[in-house]
Image: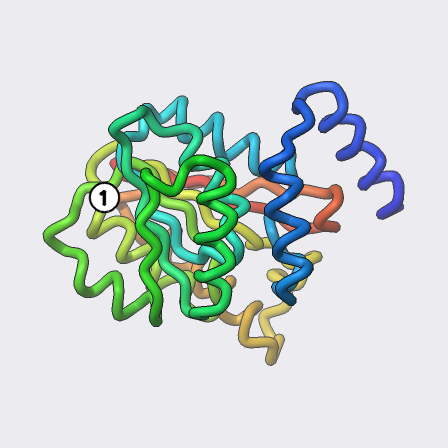
Amino acid sequence: MSARWQAVDAYIADKLLCADDALAATLANNAAKGLPPIDVSAAQGKMLFLLAQIAGARRILEIGTLGGYSTTWLARALPDDGELVTLELDAHHAAVARENLENAGVSAKVDIRVGPAATSLAAMISEAPFDFVFIDADKQSGAHYVGEAIRLGRPGTTIIVDNVVREGGVLDANSEDERIVGTRALFDRIAADPRLDATAVQTVGAKKWDGFMLARVR
């Protein structure tokens, strides 16, 4: 079945997404520099682009840069005077992302900050509010990152969290996988917070079976 999922993703990309040399070069450079192939798919990248535009985002916060593939999609959604702050733990990943963002022509809009995301977020209180937040970092800290996104947001801020289904692993209350434990804590955190309206959507495709959380600050 996964081959058919991938074929549908390829069909979507062929019909609805144009060939993109800069994004293709980003993925090639990531592979050449040893980054793991865990970027969002092309269709998911375009979804992020459209959601950020629909939200009218002028300031975007991304938690988890990797090689800058999703960062490029989000930066393209910004107006000319827009700003994207992206947080990356790994200095090598951040260096590769800088190369890719420069090649894609969006580096002037992007501020990459290297170090533990929790530390970076704690220092950002004076930089609020952000209009749109994309969280795609360590799953163990997802609940904390959502709390920080609310703190750094405003009424109407859109929050997207990736990888929240984990091939159905989220159902396993007895899992010892820290990523699943963290994802379940994320669901509990969002469900209990009256400041958020939220849903989650399962996805299948090139990234197998997973899903994303979509929330809006009230």
Residue 158, position as x, y percentages in the image: 35, 37
In the rendered image, the quadrant that contains the C terminus is top left
Task: Name the residue: 75% across, 42% down.
Answer: 205
Element type at marker 1?
Answer: loop
Relative vertical location of residue 166 with respect to residue 72 in this rendering, above or below = below
Residue 171, above or below 71: below
The residue drawn where x is 45% and y is 61% is: 95
Return the residue found at the far top.
15
Q: Which residue occupies 44% across, 30% down?
A: 76
- Between residue 43 and residue 33, name the one nearer to us: 33
Q: Is 183 drawn above or below residue 128 in the view shown? A: below
Q: In this orientation, which residue lies closer to the viewer: 19 or 52?
A: 19
Residue nearest the viewer, comparing 124 with 199: 124
Where is residue 187? Give x, y as percent.
46, 56
Dot 1 amino acid type:
Gly
Taking 206 as reference, is 113 above or below it?
Answer: below
Q: Residue at x 31, y 30 (%)?
A: 57
Q: Visible in this render: residue 136? A: no
Is residue 50 among what the camera can see? yes
Percent of width and height locating residue 161? 47, 49
Q: Residues within 10 Å of mark 1 (few under 14, many from 20)?
A: many
